[in-house]
Image: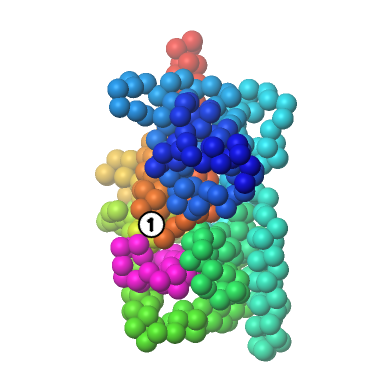
Amino acid sequence: MKKEIKELLNKHDAEWRFPGSVLENFRALSAIAKYDKSLLSGGALGKIIAGLVEIEKEPGGPYYSQFSQIGLKTKGRIDAETNRAIAEFLALYDVFLPNLAEYVKEKKFSSLPSEINTAKKGRPPRSGAGIRTGRPEISAEEKKTMSGIRFLLEKRLSSVPASLRAPARRAFWKTVRGNPDKQMPLIGYFMKESLGKSGKKAPARLAEEIGLLNSFFWSAFIIYDDFWDKDEAADPVLLPVANMFSRAHAEFFRHPPCLSGAKEKSEYGKFFSRVMNELDAANCWELERCRARVSAGVFHIPEHLPPYGDYSKKYEPASGHILGPILLLALSGRKVFGEEARNLELCFKHLLIAMQLLDDMHDLEEDMKRGHISTAAAALLQELPPEKKEINLKKEMPELKRIFWFSVVPKLSKEAVARCRRARRALMAIRAIENPVFLEKLIFAREKAAREALVLCADSAAFIKSCRSQS
């Protein structure tokens, strides 16, 4: 080991902070990581990220120049050099924080990490599951996992009737293409890498198997949802495909072959049953409570709006997404009904709620035309006079959009931000997670989307106020 690196390693405290400013801290961390990433364990990375959260101006940056200290009243100022050092360190771990990248780029540095230079803005296509992020580049390992998933898909399809193969392929890849950050197919890979050394206990190709089955789950979710929402474009041929995907997903996760102990199998089986029962009950609740009659372009407001409450009903239909991560946590030696598993489920619960809220805001007009009272539609209807009983969707939609933009979007965006924060706190509480960056970036992406909506709403309101004051 180099003398300089050895000296650096002798200087950090229990929180992996070095003497001096945040700038000096991250220059030291980058030097260590460039020399040998294994010197920074998953636990160290977790503490480093927790330290960043402590000095952030906004989630994802920019960051202040001093860590919080006893007797220090300020966190210092926000400067370009400090934030560039943080960005360069995170780039070594393929972590991209949009707010941080935007701040650093504004300072016009000539040399930036490639992850910052290649970041693109723009509105992504609809995911069907609430994902509203850009199209980040995926790593070589992620591409390898995707290739493995493709192989497993073709292997499975080779044993099904020929009439199912083509529509199954179309549905599967449509789901994957509509998921820009590849969370659906790569959730097994993300979770396995998050677990660090303990993640190595899982079978070599389990991350790929989980990715395949999780994409089956989401494909079936989207197909069923289109029929429940009475989408005119829903293809009846896809119903047998959705059934096949759901069956494969359930068969594997009901009794995962990779669990060897009888107790572990029993505990996971109970968890699977609980999740799927809640999932089916939530779908039933939505079909009964979240529908309105629409006739001749008129939306008839029901007497009682769906009581979304704490939004658990937006998590439960998508909760099959958690089965793979919980399985990998169990294989690492943790209890399925233990504290760490509860925190992992909370992390995904809040993340999925944020995703679904963003999706509902995006699809308001489409949902209302189908008579679907989403969270966004319910919040909008609550803004209307109580005596109003029906809405002419064609004539009144411009005014509804105005109310929605200035009253509903800020409310639901703030809720999405709050859910992302709760997801992050739950993630940081999981001791088994050695490399939180893989799951943390999923949280940051949703938080960014929600905060961007809040900024747009505020800018629009300020613009209108300015125009009125000048008229």
Residue 103 at x, y = what percent?
58, 28
Q: How many marks?
A: 1
Q: Residue at x 38, y 57 (%)?
A: 431
Residue 31 at x, y = what percent?
61, 38
Residue matched to label 1: 430
Q: Under tag 1, what secondary structure?
A: loop
- Residue 44 seen in render: yes
Q: Which residues are magenta?
A: 315-342
Q: Residue at x 67, y 89 (%)?
A: 159
Q: Is residue 66 placed above or below 7 in the rendered structure?
A: above
Q: Residues within 10 Å of mark 1 (few under 14, many from 20)?
A: some
Q: Which is more toward the observer, 315 or 71? A: 71
Please state if 2 lies on the left or on the right of 188 as rendered.
Answer: right
- The kind of residue tagged 1 is Ile
What is the basis of the colouring in this image? rainbow
Q: Is residue 334 magenta?
A: yes
Q: Is residue 183 placed above or below 394 in the rendered structure?
A: below
- Residue 210: image quadrant is bottom right
Residue 375 at x, y = what percent?
38, 52
Q: Residue at x 32, y 49 (%)?
A: 389
- Residue 122: image quadrant is top right
- Residue 170 seen in render: no
Q: Which is more toward the observer, 451 or 327? A: 327
Q: Residue furthest top?
A: 470
Q: Which is more toward the observer, 395 or 70? A: 70
Please state if 168 lies on the left or on the right of 298 as rendered.
Answer: right
